[in-house]
Amino acid sequence: MKRLRVVRGWKDLPASDKGSAIAVGSFDGVHRGHQQVIALAAEAAKQLGVPLGVITFAPHPRAYFRQGEPAFALQKRDQQARALEALGVEVLYLLPLEPELAEMTDREFATKVLAEGLGARHIAVGFDNTFGKGRSGTPEAMRGYGQELGFGVSVAPAVTGEEGGKFSSTRIREALREGRPHEAAEILGRPFAIEGEVQRGRQLGRKLGFPTANVSIAGYVVPRFGVYATRTRLPDGRRFPGVANIGVNPTIEGQTDPVLEVWLFDFDEDLYDQVIETELIAFLRPEEKFPDLDTMVVQIRVDAQAARTLLNA
């Protein structure tokens, strides 16, 4: 598998960074609908004998145009890059979403960015893709620009699940906020995962007999507060089953920002300052405030056994 390289911007690129077959979109989550768009670009790349590329934007268009809304991300940039690389993407074009780009008409975007800047040989978009100022560009418009400017265009149809709902990042966020990680995983094609550096806390869990690795969830869509069966990947690639709480731990005063606190089963090593990635496999129960620490510890033991049973751990 070829390694993914990141190209930041679209101006004055060397010839080696131009001429790809490119999937265009935000690709937050790189879910199964996104994967169909990328598959069309991959098919064109193979036929044309050119690299497979993906265009996305920094920041995400929603963060740029709808500032002040709650956090919504399904992935950090490194997670997105790994997911794209696993699909065979060779070039990630990370376009800075600044006033110049944000104010471009759909024609200007197709001409200046796709044709002239990136020298695109082929463009793949989703059936509902929009581009250009005011989201005026449509897949049909992209086909027209491709014919005019000399690049091929393919459009991916909607991808739906067994129950008929369209796969989308919005549905994933709704599922996570409502405590349905299994539904999010169906749309993603893999479990939703939170990645972050293990923080130094009060070490209360260790004192109570269940040491936890605490990770900020800032920037992510906030899943339903509660307890989850999990699997965690360490920096060295090892994976451990566990149980985690997402929330503010109301039994212990002083915490205001939501945190992931994961207890890795059969593990006793120092993880402070290391980056781990924890998958949410199943929702076990809502977060609750206990009358005392002893009651909380009893419930955590029950939760851990439920998680072990579910994970066959």
Image (tube, rainbow, N blue to C red):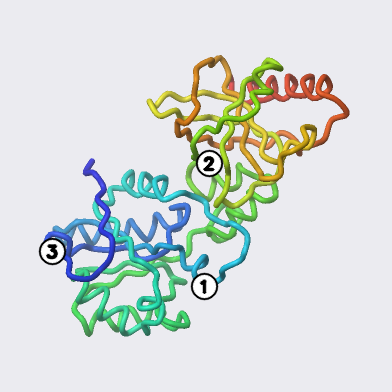
Is residue 238 toward the left or the right of residue 18 in the image? right
The extreme right residue here reads 291
Quadrant of the rendered image containing residue 165: bottom right
Quadrant of the rendered image containing residue 56: bottom left
- Residue at image coords 19%, 69%: 121
Residue at numbered disc 2: 194
**Residues marked 2 and 3 touching at CB (< 8 Å):** no
User: Which is more N-terminal, label 1 or label 2?
Assistant: 1
Depicted 139 relative to depicted 246: above or below: below
- Residue at image coords 23%, 63%: 21
State the image coordinates of residue 154 (x, y, percent, origin top left): 31, 69
**Cα distance, mark 2 to mark 1?**
25 Å
Quadrant position of the C terminus in the picture: top right
Looking at numbered disc 3 in the image, what kind of residue is underneath it? Answer: Pro
Residue at numbered disc 1: 65
> Looking at the rendered structure, which numbered label has been put on residue 14?
3
Looking at numbered disc 1 in the image, what kind of residue is underneath it? Answer: Phe
State the image coordinates of residue 111 (x, y, percent, origin top left): 25, 81
- Mark 3 residue element: loop
- Residue at image coords 20%, 62%: 20
**Residues marked 2 and 1 touching at CB (< 8 Å):** no
